Image (spheres, helix red, strand yellow):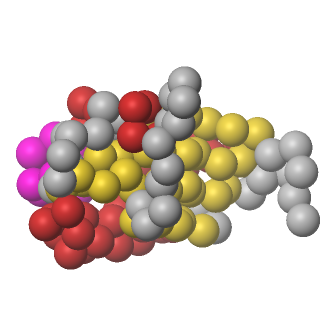
Amino acid sequence: MSYVDGFLVPVPEGKKEAYRAVALQAAGIFKSYGATRVVEAWGDDVPDGKVTDFKKAVQLDAGEVVVFSWVEWPDKAARDAGMAKVMVDPMMQPGAQEMPFDGKRMIFGGFAAIVEE
């Protein structure tokens, strides 16, 4: 079964196109190292929760939108090998490009698929 890296990021509303440009570039990098699919989804219908929600998870500020994204890999071994290359890629290094979001509030994790339909 596949392996997925998931991300939540708070992005200022006015930086949607800048984020999209950076995301397109990152998608190419992930795919060059073995990812099979990269999805970046701009928050459109993100409700407030009673206990927790996507907004609270990233400490969303006024004027920001939650972006939900994921990178799909064939399996965990491919992800581990690919992600090791992503982490040393010159374009993915701090300062290589201006990030249109607050990376300190990004949430991420790796997930092993248990259902694929």
Instruction: Let me know if residue 5 appears in the view.
Output: yes
In-image side of 2 versus 111 (left or right): right
- Position of the C terminus, as image quadrant, is bottom right
Instruction: Let me know if residue 88 appears in the view.
Output: no
- Residue 102 spot, x, y in % from top left: 20, 40
Magenta segment includes 94? yes
Above or below: residue 13 compared with residue 68? below
Query: In this orientation, which residue lies closer to the viewer: 10 or 4?
Result: 10
Above or below: residue 68 compared with residue 38? above
- Residue 103 spot, x, y in % from top left: 25, 38
Magenta segment includes 93? yes
In-image side of 53 versus 14 (left or right): right
Q: Residue furthest front?
A: 50
In-image side of 13 versus 75 (left or right): left
Q: Main secondary structure of the magenta part?
A: loop
Query: In this orientation, which residue lies closer to the viewer: 62 or 73?
Result: 62
- Residue 44 spot, x, y in % from top left: 44, 66
Magenta stretch, residue numbers: 90-99
**Residue at figure coordinates x 71%, y 47% from the top left:** 3
